[in-house]
Amino acid sequence: MDDAARGEELTKGSSHLIWPTVIAAIIATVGVAIYVVTEEKPPAATGQVVSVVSHLMHRDTSGVDANGVAMPKEHFDQVLVFAHVRLHNQSKQPLFVRQIMSNLTLADGIHTSYAAIPADYERIFVAYPELASLHGKPIVTDATIPAGETLEGDFVSAFRIDKSQWDGRKGLEFDISFRYLPDLKLTPTTPVSDR
């Protein structure tokens, strides 16, 4: 016998393993696909950003601290971002809103601002009556959304940036944080209006 004949003896019968291996792989793939499709659950909450309005403010401090002592005046710019959102609980359990964050992407990275709690939201309109047209019903921190219900309301976040930084933004999104669940990320689908 020559060397070629010996090699043929070693490979005889190995073709019988290919077909069972292919069939087993197909059955396993179909089984995993069926499991994923039947066990996949929709997210507990969905949401929509109804509108976003920004308001640029330039402020100078009074030059007097809380005790009436003179101090240097400071100048600063800030952008107030007013958002109106709609959140829907599509689960069978109540959802508990923990906090809301606004994430602004600028050239130097992401800047995050927590939404003002309802009491601070109301104070903004007392301090700045010219913003009265932007007043709405605030979303309560620790709000509960019953199963199948929708929560709709407003919140405001503040960023210490100037107009050129705001105009050069690369993105804006909102994170709604729920207790015991992953955050819901919402991106505005309509343009941000400036006032």
Image (cartoon, rainbow, N blue to C red):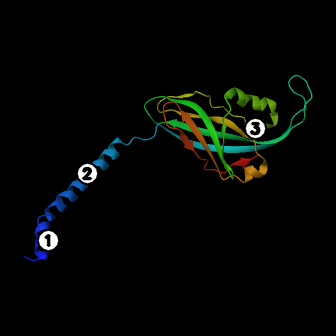
Q: Which residue is mark 1?
A: 7
Which element type, helix, strand or loop, lies under badge 1? helix
| x and y, in percent, of residue 62 in the image | 89, 32
Residue 150 is marked as none
The answer to whether the residues at label 3 and label 2 have Cβ atoms under 8 Å apart is no
Q: Amino acid at mark 1?
A: Gly
Estimate the spatial distance between the alpha carbons at disc 2 and disc 1, rounded to whole Å. Answer: 33 Å
Measured along the vertical axis of the image, is residue 16 above or below residue 30? below
Which element type, helix, strand or loop, lies under badge 3? helix
Q: Where the N terminus falls, by quadrant?
A: bottom left
Q: Amino acid at mark 3?
A: Ser
Residue 126 occupies quadrant:
top right
Left or right? Give the position of 85 relative to 145: right
| x and y, in percent, of residue 138 in the image | 66, 31
User: Which of the two marks, 2 or 1, is nearer to us in this view?
Assistant: 1
Of the numbered discs 3 and 2, the one sitting upstream in the chain is 2
Of the numbered discs 3 and 1, the one sitting upstream in the chain is 1
* 95 or 129, nearer to the observer: 95
Residue at point 11%, 71% (across, down) = 6
| x and y, in percent, of residue 152 in the image | 59, 35
Q: Which residue is mark 3?
A: 133
Residue 28 is marked as 2
